[in-house]
Image: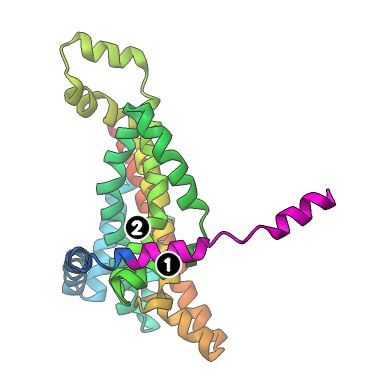
Amino acid sequence: MNNALVILSGIPAIPLAKWINSFVNWLTGFAGFFNALTAGIGAILDSIQWILDLFPAWLFIIIILALTWYILRNSKHWGFMIFELLGLALIWNQGFWHDMTQTLTLVLATSLIIIVIGVPLGIWMAKSNTVNMIVKPILSFMQTMPAFVYLIPAVALFGIGMVPGVVASVIFSLPPIVSTTCLGIQQVPADLQEAAVAFGCNNWQKLYKVELPIARTTIISGINQGMMLALSMVVIASMIGTMGLGSLVYFAVGRNDAGAGFAAGIAIVILAIILDRLSEGLGSSKRHQNK
């Protein structure tokens, strides 16, 4: 045992950090691509923020309450609607409204991107064992890597601000939706797939008319998980200039201001609960419609 330790101690350290830095530096050579990506994500952020800023706070609260009533109409939801009303009114009262809409913009933009990427990738994984074998370890790596690590290459490639925060959030929150989409498609009963083929469905028709509707609840569950991870990541991304409620917490930590930090933290919790219940309710409402 001691001889083995002596041998290992004499082996030079693998320059892993140097290799990773070289790879990141190589990626910076594609400045045109990353500038275009920055412009595209920035356009999505600006569009969502512009829509949210159209509504005064009182009207936005009414819209959220109406949306909640519609999504959760098949369940007991009055208590939650009261919570929404009081919670959003508290955020407004504390002067956090614009910061809340900025955080919501980041979460919605991230959710949109992970849906566009994650659902097709999850379907591909379910249809191809080779893709599944390649992508699954990558997803495990992405889920276990500490969230702070994603901020470093995001800053190197996209600078500071809202866009790198979205990029880091997408990487961090993508695995759940890919995994759940793959799982949902794989769990579609074989007899239903055979029946679809017997009725003359091709692969695309079978996917659209049979597999996706049955897997929809599982996919929405993955979207819910991804949205919650995105919210946690955009708070962490305040360290690289991402604005919103997370920046209020970050500044409060720097000033050792417990009151301001907890007040902003409560606003984040309120927003998280609302997003969680609404996204979860989408799956429940679809189940009731199917019945």
Picture residue at 78% right of the left edge, 49% below the top: 4
What type is the residue that disc 2 sits on?
A: Val
Q: What residue is drawn where x is 35% and y is 52%?
A: 278
Q: Which mark is residue 170?
A: 2
Q: Alpha-carbon neighbours of circle 2 within 10 Å: few (<14), some, or many (≥20)?
A: many
Which label lies toward us, 2 or 1? 1
Task: Identify the residue at the far bottom of this view.
Answer: 255
The magenta region covers: 1-25
Disc 1: CA contacts within 10 A as few (<14), some (14-19) or many (>=20): few
* 156 drawn magenta: no
Q: CA distance from mark 2 to mark 1?
A: 21 Å
Give the residue number, with chain letter if any, for mark 1.
Answer: 21
Question: How far from the left and from the top, in percent, is residue 61?
Answer: 28, 68
Q: Quadrant of the image for the C terminus?
A: top left
Q: Secondary structure at mark 2?
A: helix
Disc 2 + disc 1, Cβ < 8 Å:
no
Point out residue 75 in the picture as x, y percentages from the top left corner.
Answer: 39, 43
Q: Label 1 is placed on what type of residue?
A: Asn
Q: Quadrant of residue 162?
A: bottom left
Asked if 163 appears above or below 98 in the picture, the reply is above
Q: Nearer the viewer, residue 283 or 247?
A: 247
Instruction: Identify the residue shown where x is 16% and y is 19%.
Output: 202
Q: Is residue 108 visible?
A: yes
